Image: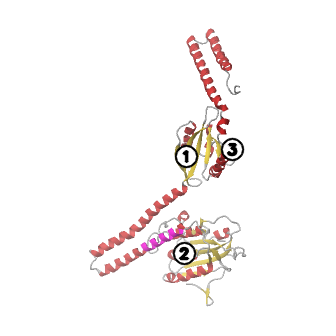
Amino acid sequence: MKSPDRPRRRDIALTAGLGVFIMAVLALSGEMEAGVFLAGSLALAGLAAVYYLTALTAAEPSARPAEAGASLRPVEIDACEAMLERLPIPVLLIGPGGRIERANPSARAFLGLGAERGLLSTALRQPRVLEAVSAALRGERGAAVEYSTLAPLESHVRAFVEPIRLDVPGPMPFRAMLVLADDTSSKRAERMRADFLANASHELRTPLASLSGFLETLQGPAHDDEEARDRFLAIMKEQTERMRRLIDDLLSLSRVEMNEHVAPTGSVELNDLARDVTEALRLVAERRAITLELTLADTPAQVRGDHDQIYEVVENLVENAIKYSPDGSQVRIWVEAPRTRDGAEHMPERMDPQSGRLTLSAPPLDPDARFAVVRVRDNGPGIERRYLPRLAERFFRVDGQKSGPTAGTGLGLAIVKHIVSRHRGGFTVESAPGAGSVFSAFFMLAPAQATAPPAPPSGTGPVEQTAGAVTKV
């Protein structure tokens, strides 16, 4: 029995004959030259033959799909379907015209496809990938394409395209399999390592060059100059101390990053910790006649976290405040608890009408979470808005604060950000030129504290007292 899709010879012959007849009438009427009539007749006959052969070869395999599919048992088909659905890697099957015929859940989530299946070009606007898919649909060799995007977020992706020939009727048996691999994390890690080595070597080069120069001077012209020798030795000691601080900060940052993906399970009382940090830095502030004023929360502030790392956060913030505040000024440290996320991120009032606010690290969204906050305010020169997004970058220091007695390693705030991220907390800054800065770090309260009533507005809690007087160091 003939297939209903098989072309009929009589229909093709009648169509070709009708065309030749029409051209013959035009030739007899003088509208068409004899040579043109002959060429047109031959062309029409050739096209009819090609059409018949093409349609015949496309229609014949139609009886075979059932036989081919019969070799693959239904259980195996179901297993393949389940494997494809559970693959964490985006996989798509692209059909003729660049239309998406199949996409696993990872691909739909990666490209934002939803349930509908449209054209690949509307979901992935990457010309090189689309060209590779078109080539695969023509049966050409597969290709691997890398592309990057910067908006809305930076991403780096490798696309693997391979042709697949299916036993289906029609003149286009090829499909294109598209596999997408997200290389964003590895690319960022490579860039971070390169930047880290470049910046670290740059930071170490200056003190090492200074030490080398002073040693050569002491061995040569200043060999017998006691005054110059003492001055040079003092500078060398300062440079050596700077290198030691840099190495300590690098090691601290590495330790934090190593465990950043593991949330701590301990518990810390933030009021007691802030008191310990203030007492430890009392002598440092006294040398410059800076007053430290500590205000504690009305309620206990028991937070989830690692004691040593949270201590390092508060210590870094208070040290920075002392470092950038002028002699004889005041540094305020206060603890607030409990606070909602919004209350923890922003103070009730702006420190200055022109101040800039920025969240450098934010906790996961949880409307029921409550936090304890430690805020540190200095009376330094303040920071311009354009610098705020870069404050937690490694080795970044604001222009005009990169040298002199307050020079640091540029890693302190980067360490703070990573520790806060590990604790699933938040880190914010508010600053205005000429008005100083306020840095806030907040941590999630332990479960027993999370249901406590809200604390009073900032600045109304108890002030740390000694013998009935406000503690001002």
CB contact under 8 Å: marks 2 and 1: no
Q: Does residue 238 lie above or below 166 as drawn?
A: below
Residue 252 location (% of width, % of height)? 50, 71
Name the secondary structure under disc 3.
helix
Disc 3/disc 2 C-alpha distance (Å): 61 Å
Q: In the rendered structure, which segment of residues is drawn in magenta? A: 242-256
Q: Is residue 322 left or right of residue 204?
A: right
Name the secondary structure under disc 2.
helix
Which of discs 3 and 2 lies nearer the camera? The answer is 3
Q: Earlier in the sequence, mark 2 or mark 1?
A: 1
Q: Mark 3 points at which residue?
A: 74
Q: Which of 157 and 225 is in front in this view?
A: 157
Q: Can residue 75 be seen in this view?
A: yes
Q: Mark 2 points at which residue?
A: 312
Name the residue rendered at 66%, 47% in the picture. 81
Q: Residues within 10 Å of mark 2 (few under 14, many from 20)?
A: some
Disc 3/disc 1 C-alpha distance (Å): 29 Å
Q: Name the residue under label 1.
A: 160
Question: Which amino acid does the dot numbered 2 rest on?
Answer: Glu
Question: Which amino acid does the dot numbered 3 rest on?
Answer: Pro
| The image quarter in which residue 465 lies | bottom right
Question: Which amino acid does the dot numbered 1 rest on?
Answer: Phe
